[in-house]
Amino acid sequence: MDTFDPVPIFRYQEMEQKEENDLNLKAMNAEELREQAHKMVDFIADYYKTIESFPVLSQVQPGYLGKLLPDSAPTCPESLQHVLNDVQEKILPGVTHWQSPNYFAYFPSNSSIAGFLGEMLSAGLNIVGFSWITSPAATELEAIVLDWLAKALLLSHDFFSTGQGGGVIQGTASEAVLVVLVAARDKILRTVGRTALPKLVTYASDQTHSSLQKACQIGGLDPELCRLLKTDSSTNFALSPDVLSEAISDDIASGLIPFFLCANVGTTSSTAVDPLPALAKVTRTNNIWFHVDAAYAGSACICPEYRHFIDGVEEADSFNMNAHKWFLTNFDCSLLWVKERSALIQSLSTNPEYLKNKASEGNMVIDYKDWQIPLGRRFRSLKLWMVLRLYGLEGLQAHIRSHIAMAAYFEELVVQDKRFKVVAPRTFSLVCFRLLPPPNSKDNGNKLNHDLIDLVNSTGSVFITHTVLSGEFVLRFAVGAPLTEVRHVKAAWQILQEKATALLQIYH
Amino acid sequence: MDTFDPVPIFRYQEMEQKEENDLNLKAMNAEELREQAHKMVDFIADYYKTIESFPVLSQVQPGYLGKLLPDSAPTCPESLQHVLNDVQEKILPGVTHWQSPNYFAYFPSNSSIAGFLGEMLSAGLNIVGFSWITSPAATELEAIVLDWLAKALLLSHDFFSTGQGGGVIQGTASEAVLVVLVAARDKILRTVGRTALPKLVTYASDQTHSSLQKACQIGGLDPELCRLLKTDSSTNFALSPDVLSEAISDDIASGLIPFFLCANVGTTSSTAVDPLPALAKVTRTNNIWFHVDAAYAGSACICPEYRHFIDGVEEADSFNMNAHKWFLTNFDCSLLWVKERSALIQSLSTNPEYLKNKASEGNMVIDYKDWQIPLGRRFRSLKLWMVLRLYGLEGLQAHIRSHIAMAAYFEELVVQDKRFKVVAPRTFSLVCFRLLPPPNSKDNGNKLNHDLIDLVNSTGSVFITHTVLSGEFVLRFAVGAPLTEVRHVKAAWQILQEKATALLQIYH
C-alpha cells in the first residue's frame, strides 16, 4: 500500500476555535436545496412535456454508456447543470420510457403527480423507519392507510391492523410472497419439526409469476417440490381445484407435506383469475397457507363492478397487490395483508440490544422491521396516502375504468381485423392477441408474431411485450400508463396493422 | 355481496367519439406536476430551514395518529395544501428527525442535496429496471458507478464488472448479506448435495449485525448453526482468528459443514474491526465464503488514511457498504460487490417467457434482477452518481473527515470529564461511553446510564442510542448528520453533563 498521511489528529483546543464554518461542507443547506430542487422540478416537468419525442423502448446498444462516461469518479465537484446536460444527452437515450403514453409493455408502473410528490417528501425527510420509535408517524400512517385500503377493497376484518392481522408495504410482490412463504414454512415446521423441511410442497398454477419459484429457492425449499400445475385454455389458464386436490393427495401419499398455495388474480401472461372460493376449500381441508397474488389486478377491485374477482379472499391467509403497478403510486409500493401477523413476526423478528426501546419492549407498537426482509425501510406510506387523498377513491376508480375501457376498445379493434385473433379473454386492461399465419404457412405463427413485435418496437413509437400461451407466441397489449389516451391506443393499433401488412406480404 | 352495476361496456363507435378528453384523468400532466412540485420543494426547504425547532426524537405516544386521521380513505380528491397542512400538524410531530444536526443515534442516514435531487429524478422517470432492456441506462450506470467506487476504494479488479465480478445496489445490508448467503449456500450444496442443508454452519462474531441471523432464518439454515463467536474488550470486540479456527475444527469434527463467514469492518455496537487478513487465511483453508460487512465504515475507506481498515478485502468473496449511511446518498442504497457474479445468478435467476428478450438471451448484458431478491428495481444509481459528481471524491472525503474530527472532539470532551468513561476505542465517528456509577453504588451503572439516556432524549434537544458491551449498558454518540456542526456536538455534551449532574445528585 502507498504511504498515506497519518490520521489527522484534531485537538480539543483547535476544535474550539474552528467552530462550525470550517467543518460545514454544505452537504445540506435549506436555501441551496431550494434553488437546485426547483431546477430539478423544471427538468422533470419538461421531461413529461416532451416524453412523446423519445423512442418508448430505448434503442441503444449494450455497452453504450461506458463509451460516454469517464472511467473514474470525479475528484472535484461538478455543477448540477453539467449533470443535467449529461442526463439529457447520455442517460435519456438509454431510458425505456415507462411513463410514455405509448408504453403498453409488461404491466404498467404508474407514476402520478401525487405519487411523485409523496416520493419527494419521503426523500426529503429521509427517515429510516425500522422500529416505531424511529418515526412513529411512518409506522402509524402505514397501518392506517393499509386499513383504509383494506376497507376500500372490502377485505374481511381479519386483515385489519385492529385485529390479529394487518397490512404492510413491501418493496415488490416478490418480497411479499417470500415473507409469507417463510412464515408458512416456519409455522408448519413448528408442528412437524425442522427435519421435515425437504418434504414441504408449494403449489401454484404454471401461470404463476416466477417470483414464487425464486422465493422457494431463497427459502431453502426443494425447487423440485414447487409444483406449477398445468393450466390451459379450457379454464382460461386458471388453476383447477380438482388438479390441485389430486396433486395434494399424490404428494401426501408419497409422504410429502403440502403447506403453501399461491393463487392468482390476474396472472402476468394473460390476467387469468384462479377460482379463489373453490381453492380455499382445498387449502382448508389440507391445512395449507393460502396466499392470493393480485399484484396487478388487485387495484381494479376498488371498483364495485370488479370486486367479485377477489371473492373468496376472506378465506386467504395473505393477500398482495402492487400499488406501484396500477394505482398511481410510484414504484416501489407493494401492499401485503396478513391475517396472522404473529406468523410473520415469528419468522422475521430480531431483537438486538442496540435497537431496544421502551415502546417496542412494551409491545405497544408495530415494528415493521419484523414484517419484512430488510431492517431499514423508507417512509413509503406517504406517497400512498397522498395518492388516496389527492385523487380520492372515485378518482382512482375512474382511472382504472378508463384504462379498462381503452383496453376493451383495443380488443374490438383487433376483433374487427380478421387477420388477427384475440387469444385469451380480456378481463382487465390487458389484451392478448396474435397475427394469424397465412394459410399453408410453415410457421405456426410464432415466428411471424416474433417478427411483428420486433418490427413494431423498433419503430420507437410504441412498446409492447409478449408471452407464450399453450405454446403460442402471443402479443400483450397492456393499457396503464397515466398519460395514455384513446388516440395513443389508436395510433399503436395503426402501427401494428401497418407492420402486419408489410410482414404478410413478405410471408406470402 | 351487494348488487353492483354491470361491467360497463364501451362500444367501438362510442370510443371513437369520446376521444381523449373524457378519459384523461390528469393523473399526470407536465404543467400541473411543475406547479405542485415547486410547492413541495418549498415545503421541504422550509423543513430543513426549521429542522432544529422539532424535538429530534418524536415525543408522541403510541396510537397518536389514529386519533388525528379519519378511518376511511376520502371519496373525493383533496387539495395539496390541505395535505401539506396535515403533514405539518399531524405527521411531523410523529417524525424522528434523522436529518437534524442534533441526531446522534444508531448510525447516521445521510440525506444530501445531491442525493435528494437524484431521488427526485429517479421518481420522475419511474422506470422499473429489472432487465437491461427495461432501461439500459439504469443497468449500465449502476455497473459504471459501482466500478468508479470500487476504484476509489482500491478494491481488487476481481470486484469490477469488467471481470467475473461486479457491483450491484441492494436496498439494505440485510438484503446484501441474504443474497450472498444464499449464493454461498447453493454453491456448497452443488458440491455436497442438497441433503446437506441442515449441516451448513455460518460464522461471525457476536458483534455482527442481527441481519445475518435473520438471513440464516430466511434461507432455511438451521438457526442453531449460526455461530456468533464470543468477543470481548481484549480484542476491542473484534473476532479472533483463533476462535474462528477452533470453532470450525470442532464443527468439522462433528460432521458439520462450515460454509460462510461474515466479517465486520465497523460493528454496529462499537465500530469494531475484524482482522480481515488473518480471517481470510482461515476461510481459504476451509473453503468458506468470506463476506465483509462494512455497512457503516466502508464509506470512510475512500480516505487514504482509513483505507487500511479494509486491508484483506482482496481475499473476500463479497463486500458491502451502505452509501445511504455515511456517503450522502439518500436511503436506500446499499452497495454490494462480488467476485463471482455467476454464483449470485445461479441462485437468483429466473427466466420466464414474458421477460425474454434478445439482449438477455444473447448474454450481452447484465440483468440485475438475477443479482437480488425482488424482480423490480428503482433507478438508484442516479442518486449515487449525482452524489459523486456534485461533491466529487474530495468533497466526500472532507465530509467523512469532518464527522470523524467532530467525534474525536466529543471523545476528548468525555475524557476531560472524569465522571465519564470512554468504553471502547473510537475508530470512526462513533464514541461509546458511559457515566460511571458513584462509588459504593448498588447499581453497576446500567440503571444510571439507562436513566441518563431517557432524560437526555426526552428533552427533544438531542437523540442518542445505546448498546451493551460485555454486560455494560453503554451510550453511543454517532456523528454523521450532514447539518451537524461543532456547536451541536458541544450543545449535546452540555445536555449530557447537565443531566448527569442532576442524576448523580439523586443517586447520592
Image: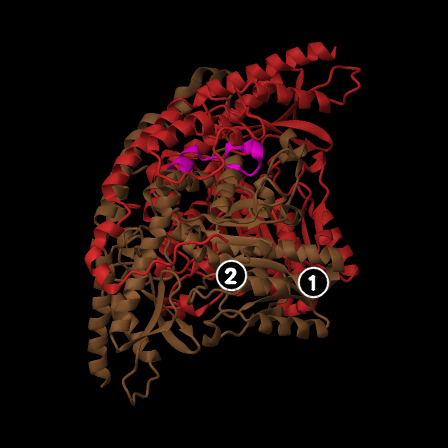
Chain colours: A red, B brown
In the rendered image, residue B18 lying in the magenta stretch gets the answer: no
Q: Cβ–Cβ below 8 Å for labels 1 and 2?
A: no
Magenta-drawn stretch, dominant element (helix, strand or loop)? helix
Q: Nearer the viewer, residue A182 or B266?
A: B266
Q: Secondary structure at mark 2?
A: helix
* Residue at 73%, 63% in the rendered image: B196
Q: Which residues are magenta?
A: B120-139
User: Is B151 on the left or on the right of A467, as rendered?
Assistant: left
**Residue A382 visible, this angle:** no
Q: Secondary structure at mark 1?
A: helix
Kind of residue sitting beneath label 1: Leu
Of the numbered discs in the image, which one, if any, rests on residue B197?
1
| Structural crowding at the residue carrying mark 1, measured as other residues with C-alpha within 10 Å and reported as few (<14), some (14–19) or many (≥20) | many
Instruction: Report the residue that reaches farthest toward the front.
Output: A3
For the residues marked 1 and 2, what is the alpha-carbon distance in whole angstroms? 20 Å
User: Is A232 on the left or on the right of A169, as rendered?
Assistant: right
